[in-house]
Amino acid sequence: MRHIGAVQAVVTAAEFDREPTAAELDAIEGEMPLITAELELLDAQITTLDRAPSPLDVRRIRRARRRVLAARRELTNRGVAGSPEVA
């Protein structure tokens, strides 16, 4: 009995089987400040799930939200500065 299989790897390779490209890795690296800020916010929110937030918890969440907004602003401004202007 002969097994029939694909001769080319491209035919059988799924989208999730490949490694990220250099451009994708650069994009992730550029977004790391935002990712880190969002993780800090999530951590601050998780700590208050099973209890009432203390004044220190409220302050920590507020600061984490500000860091997320600042990171988003910086990322957006870099994207706008790098795009060509429309005439």
Image (spheres, rainbow, N blue to C red):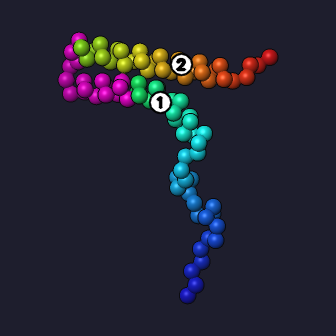
Quadrant of the drawing holding the C terminus: top right
Picture quadrant of residue 7: bottom right
Residue 43 is situated, as x and y percent measured from the top left of the image, at 31, 28
Amino acid type, callout 2: Glu
Number of marks: 2
Q: Residue shown at 69%/24% (left/top)?
A: 83
Residue 40 is situated, as x and y percent measured from the top left of the image, at 35, 26
Q: Which residues are magenta?
A: 39-55
Q: Residue shown at 24%/14% (left/top)?
A: 56
Which residue is nearer to you in this view: 55 or 21? 21
Q: In the shown orientation, is residue 53 left or right of residue 25?
A: left
Residue at which label 1 appears: 32
Q: CA distance from mark 2 to mark 1?
A: 12 Å
Q: Which mark is residue 71?
A: none
Q: In the shown orientation, is residue 53 left or right of residue 65?
A: left
Residue 50 highlighted magenta (yes or no) = yes
Above or below for 16 versus 51: below
Precedes in sequence: disc 2 or disc 1: 1
Q: In the shown orientation, is residue 54 left or right of residue 43?
A: left
Secondary structure state at the residue bearing disc 1: helix
Residue at which label 2 appears: 74
Q: Residue shown at 58%/84% (left/top)?
A: 2
Q: In the shown orientation, is residue 53 left or right of residue 61?
A: left
Residue 86 is situated, as x and y percent measured from the top left of the image, at 76, 19
Amino acid type, callout 1: Met
Q: How crowded is the residue under tag 1: few (<14 C-alpha within 10 Å), some, or many (20+)?
A: some
Quadrant of the drawing holding the N terminus: bottom right
